[in-house]
Image: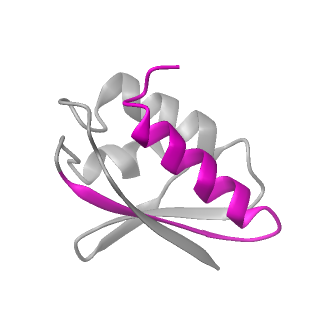
Amino acid sequence: MCAKEVLVQNQVGLHARPATFFIQKANEFKSSIWVEKEERRVNAKSLLGVLSLGIVGGVTIRIIADGADEQEAVDALVALVNSGFAE
């Protein structure tokens, strides 16, 4: 299992378009991936799950992966969040 915390830096957080980019990236990996905000954990491959966390800019989230490509998955998702979702 691999996990990293990351600060969401874009103003809108993980809503609509950024959340879509996030789950598309998560679905590129075989590992099980979760996003955690405070005490809530949701499947990072689920748009409704990610949106339900209400992640806004300036919030720290934790990305957790477990599986064959867990390190690559966490690194890629942290990089995406750090980029401000500018692909």
Q: Where is residue 71 in the image (x, y as percent from the top left)?
A: 70, 64
Please give the name of the residue rendered at 39% of the width and 29% of the height, measured from the top-left corner.
Answer: 18
Is 68 magenta? The answer is yes
Count the marks: how many? Answer: 0
Identify the image's colour scheme: rainbow, by chain, secondary structure or one colour: one colour
Q: In this view, does 22 lie above or below 40?
A: above
Q: In this view, does 76 lie to the left or right of 80?
A: right
Q: Is residue 4 left or right of residue 9?
A: right
Q: What stretch is highlighted in magenta?
A: 59-87
Please give the name of the residue rendered at 50% of the width and 37% of the height, measured from the top-left corner.
Answer: 80
Q: Which of 13 and 78 is in front in this view?
A: 78
Please give the name of the residue rendered at 71% of the width and 65% of the height, measured from the top-left corner.
Answer: 70
Q: Position of residue 42 (x, y in %)?
A: 41, 63
Task: Give the quadrant of the N terminus.
Answer: bottom right
Q: Is residue 38 left or right of residue 21?
A: left
Please give the name of the residue rendered at 38% of the width and 22% of the height, measured from the top-left corner.
Answer: 17
Res 51 → quadrant: top left
Q: In this view, does 87 lie above or below 77?
A: above
